[in-house]
Image (cartoon, rainbow, N blue to C red):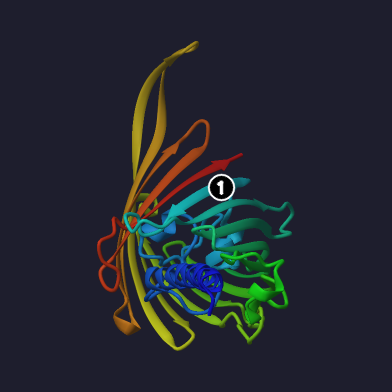
Amino acid sequence: MKPKLQSLFYCVAVRFITQFLTVVAEFTLLSVLMSGLCYAAFEDLGAGARSLGMGDAFVALADDLNASYYNPAGLVQLKSIEVQAMYAGYYLGLGESIGDGFIGYGQKLKEEMGAFGLGYLERRTSELYKEITFAVSYAKGFKAEKFSIGASLKYRYKSYKPEYDMSEPSQLDPVFQGGSSASGVSVDLGFLYRPVDFFSFGVFAGDINQPDISLMNRDAVPISFKMGTSYRFGEGGSYAINIDGLYRDGDYNLNLGIENWIILEIGEFDLQGFSQKKNQMGWRTGFSIGTNGYKNFSLGASYHLGSPDLQFDYAFIYPLSGIKNTYGTHRLAMIMRL
């Protein structure tokens, strides 16, 4: 082989190997980051911050806008319009950016017409991979809302950003011959039973139609089942103990969580003189255990302003198995009630 051809071949080979190793490394890192959590596409990583702070045990409590994710039947418990914004940063300290962004809206309708919610969730991984889920949820209560049912219709979309020029046929990976994105529609169902004020029981089935959202080979979103109970006690139900069981794609999880709200009476001066404001502070903790050695510990806190009606939630989730050398996952959310 002539020297010029050798040099050209060497440059092309080095470029190809470098790009190939970059893609493999990023996909490997993604797999490691999601170890113990990842199934197929659209892995279940929870929603909001409050629910994650109590170990992701929320199926039977489901008393805020996040019910549209955990159990849409719980939307009937909304007492006003709720608007939420949330951001989650996963496994900080590992050098890669993996995050969720969420905005949502929920409202109880008049004249016993039920409640509905809208939600938009976007997940990104180092600019290499993106998922979008847009959900429309509806719930209806029966028998003085002691029993309610709910459903969510979700549009799911995922896209990849390969580390090469897709317009060049010679570089095109067979996986991306049909494009670098895929989408589908899925359905969730939820049931909530509250025989008394201090106890509730919830059941949830997610992605029951198991949509195939693939680029080449079949990649169905697996069906998931959740069942949980919530027991509330203390003055005004200020304490809540939640227990959830989860089955998804052959794996089982058990989630345990506890929450407590404390009323804070704060004095302030305004144009009318001195007045008392009742704000609330909440704390929570949780623990999750499952198959394949899955273990998570979580802490959470909230501050709820009485006027304007704003709630700020924070959650810290730390993996007790699998992933090492991380500062954990952090979630921040703000809920406005109108």
Q: Which residue is mark 1?
A: 84
* Count of labels in the image: 1
Residue 302, picture quadrant: top left
Q: Residue at 66% of width from left, 63% of height from top? A: 135
Where's residue 289, x and y in %?
31, 76
Judged from the image, the secondary structure of the residue bearing numbered disc 1 is strand
Depth check: give the residue in front, 97 or 200.
97
Give the crowd class for mark 1: few <14, some 14-19, many >=20 residues within 10 Å.
many
User: Residue 98 vs residue 286: left or right?
Assistant: right
Q: Residue at 49% of width from left, 12% of height from top? A: 272
**Residue 80: in sight, yes or no?**
no
Taking 262 as reference, is 325 above or below it?
below
**Residue 148: in sight, yes or no?**
yes
Residue farthest toward the bottom in the current orientation of the protein: 250
Where's residue 244, x and y in %?
40, 74
Taking 223 as reference, is 198 above or below it?
above
Depth check: give the residue in front, 307 or 21.
21
Where's residue 293, x and y in %?
29, 80
Depth check: give the residue in front, 37 or 108.
37
Depth check: give the residue in front, 97 or 209.
97
Name which residue type carries label 1.
Answer: Gln
Residue 237, picture quadrant: bottom left
Residue 264, picture quadrant: top left
